[in-house]
């Protein structure tokens, strides 16, 4: 919805060099079938540029299609570290799982002073990427990963995994799951009487998880954005309901970045790719500066740790 808002604002202001933006939207279903949507955008619709996907599970098989077709991409949520390595048309204006996995490990070990962790993750490009980085860094710091298991994206019964985790009695359960899996997992963790602290990833940053009764007290990481309440209210007003989450500001900015680049170099896709490498965008609502390193990743990223209380996220402050 934030991407639609950005397009409306640009078109209402006269478009890009007098031309209106036509926003083509496809559902990548947040899984490997999303390659079909990306193929359609690249080869049938022949879009000039693409923002998204949000999910690495769709981006994994989809980015080689974009690269093959010379389609400039700004990933706005898909965070697997391997994605930008697919080729020189793939940029990320979100943060890589390298940042998130390392941050979570360091925060749990050094800030929370917890040394015994169980990891339960969705076994796809996103979950596997965070898991591998987290586990490596946590062990490097001196922590003990007492349980580590991946589950399929459609898993709803976690009782076997939860029982094994309980037997290990970890300080923290690092839960790298999508919202659809988080609900039953959190419920089953509470049902078995586990008292371990639950720590999630950025997929928990949305009402689908906040509204889960068993999510109260859960911590999670989310990219530190500088989005104002004014912008959040603007997105919600445009949508006609409260839909804002942190992904919205990254999608909004990605549209504006592409508009800035295209206004300068036109619609030649190679020129767009090359101009992205030089771009320093400071008018965004997500992060202060959108600027890419030689790896086509954001040069700098920071995180907040949130806690869910009464169906809302709050900044977590250690007392």
Image: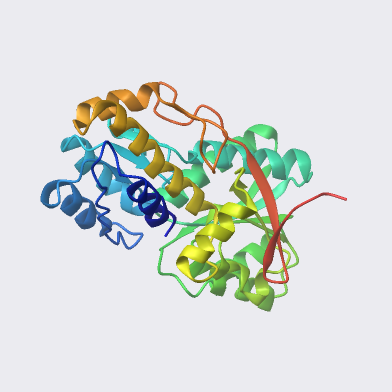
Q: Could you say where residue 13 lies in the image, as x and y percent from the top left?
A: 37, 46
**Front one among 200 and 262:** 262
- Left or right, 153 with respect to 114, comes to left
- Left or right, 117 with respect to 155, comes to right
Residue 268 occupies which quadrant of the picture?
Answer: top left
**Front one among 201 and 258:** 258
Judged from this view, the residue extending furthest toward the left is 44
Residue 215 occupies which quadrant of the picture?
Answer: bottom right
Q: Could you say where residue 281 lies in the image, as x and y percent from the top left?
A: 47, 30
**Front one among 126 and 270:** 270
Quarter of the image with the N terminus is: bottom left
Residue at position x 28%, y 28% in the image? 273
Q: Could you say where residue 201 lies in the image, as x and y percent from the top left?
A: 57, 53
Residue at position x 56%, y 72% in the image? 183
Above or below for 148 versus 96: below
Judged from this view, the residue extending furthest toward the right is 319
Q: How many marks?
A: 0
How are the colours assigned in the image? Answer: rainbow
- Left or right, 216 with respect to 32, comes to right
Q: Is residue 177 visible?
A: no
Q: Is residue 51 visible?
A: yes
Q: Could you say where residue 36 lies in the image, as x and y percent from the top left?
A: 20, 56
**Front one among 6 and 190:** 6
Above or below for 157 versus 147: below
Above or below for 259 versus 309: above
């Amino acid at each position: 919805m934030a991407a639609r808002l950005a397009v409306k604002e640009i078109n209402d202001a006269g478009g890009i060099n007098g031309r209106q933006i036509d926003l083509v939207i496809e559902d990548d279903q947040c899984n490997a079938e999303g390659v079909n949507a990306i193929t359609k955008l690249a080869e049938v619709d022949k879009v000039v540029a693409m923002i998204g996907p949000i999910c690495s599970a769709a981006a994994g098989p989809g980015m080689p299609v974009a690269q093959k077709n010379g389609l400039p991409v700004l990933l706005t949520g898909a965070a697997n570290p391997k994605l930008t390595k697919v080729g020189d048309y793939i940029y990320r204006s979100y943060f890589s799982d390298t940042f998130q996995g390392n941050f979570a490990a360091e925060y749990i070990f050094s800030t929370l002073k917890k040394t015994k962790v169980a990891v339960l993750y969705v076994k796809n490009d996103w979950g596997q990427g965070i898991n591998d980085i987290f586990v490596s860094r946590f062990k490097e710091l001196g922590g003990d990963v007492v349980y580590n298991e991946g589950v399929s994206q459609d898993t709803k019964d976690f009782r076997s995994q939860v029982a094994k985790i309980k037997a290990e009695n970890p300080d923290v359960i690092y839960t790298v799951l999508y919202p659809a899996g988080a609900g039953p997992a959190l419920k089953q963790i509470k049902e078995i009487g586990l008292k371990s602290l639950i720590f999630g990833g950025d997929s928990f940053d949305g009402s689908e998880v906040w509204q889960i009764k068993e999510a109260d007290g859960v911590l999670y990481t989310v990219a530190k954005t500088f989005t104002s309440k004014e912008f959040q209210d603007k997105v919600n007003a445009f949508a006609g309901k409260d839909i804002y989450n942190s992904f919205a500001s990254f999608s909004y900015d990605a549209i504006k970045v592409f508009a800035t680049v295209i206004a300068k170099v036109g619609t030649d896709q190679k020129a767009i790719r090359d101009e992205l490498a030089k771009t320093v965008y400071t008018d965004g609502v997500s992060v202060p500066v959108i600027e890419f390193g030689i790896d086509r990743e954001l040069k700098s990223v920071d995180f907040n740790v949130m806690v869910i209380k009464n169906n809302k996220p709050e900044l977590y402050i250690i007392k």
